[in-house]
Image (spheres, helix red, strand yellow):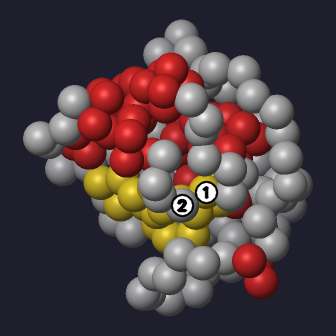
Amino acid sequence: MPLSTGAPPARPEPHGRRFRAMSGRRGPDPTPDRLTVAERGSLLLVPVARPADVPAALGWWGATNAQLTGGDVTAVLRSWEDRFGASLVSLGVDTMVLQVARRPTGAERRTVLAAEHFAFCVDNFEGFTLEDYGRALDRSDRWSFWWD
């Protein structure tokens, strides 16, 4: 699908009420010199205002088996970008990796975020409970997702 060089894509809205985001403060976004998550691949420049907008701009269908369009994914990523400084650093056919600048604090916030991750990508939870997954969120600056 060719990309338009015109106006940026319209701001996507969340799909229904699937994701009940927890409130949080917006902090500084990571800058390219502060990216620490190393991913292999090629560079793709996409004319967007923020990294979260890439899936919608590309019309990405990597999460189609979860009935999520690129616009749906962008809505979720915008929320995580605002609350956690989570920046998209890699996008594959059915995978994505985010670098996280601000990890969630407190067990309850981690469990709520783990529930958001579950609603977003159930495939990440093979062998994990919400509590286990939430504890892992406390230790990692890298969130990766894959849809089978």
Left-right relation of 127 to 115: left
- C-alpha span from label 1 to label 2: 5 Å
Look at mark 2 in the image and give the residue it sits on.
141
Q: Is residue 54 visible?
A: no
Task: Tell me which residue sits at (47%, 58%) in the image.
Answer: 140
Count of marks, rendered view: 2
Q: Is residue 134 above or below residue 111?
A: below
Dots 1, 2 in contact, CB < 8 A: yes
Tell me which amino acid carries mark 1.
Answer: Val
Most foreground residue, 132 or 121: 132
Residue ID for mark 1: 100
9 sits to left or right of 108: right
Report x, y in % for residue 146: 30, 54
The residue at the far top in this view is: 17
Helix, strand or loop status at disc 2:
loop
Where is residue 141 shown, x and y percent of the image? 54, 61
- Rendering coords of residue 68 (x, y %): 41, 35
> Which residue appears at 76% of the width and 41% of the height?
82
Q: Nearer the viewer, residue 103 or 79?
A: 103
In depth, the one of 85 and 122 nearer the eye is 85
Say whether residue 85 is visible: yes
Q: Residue at x 48, y 46 (%)?
A: 138
The amino acid type found where label 2 is placed reads Asp
Closer to the chain start, of discs 1 and 2, is 1
Q: Quadrant of residue 41?
A: bottom left
Query: For residue 115, what is the image quadrant?
Result: top left
Q: Which mark is residue 80?
A: none
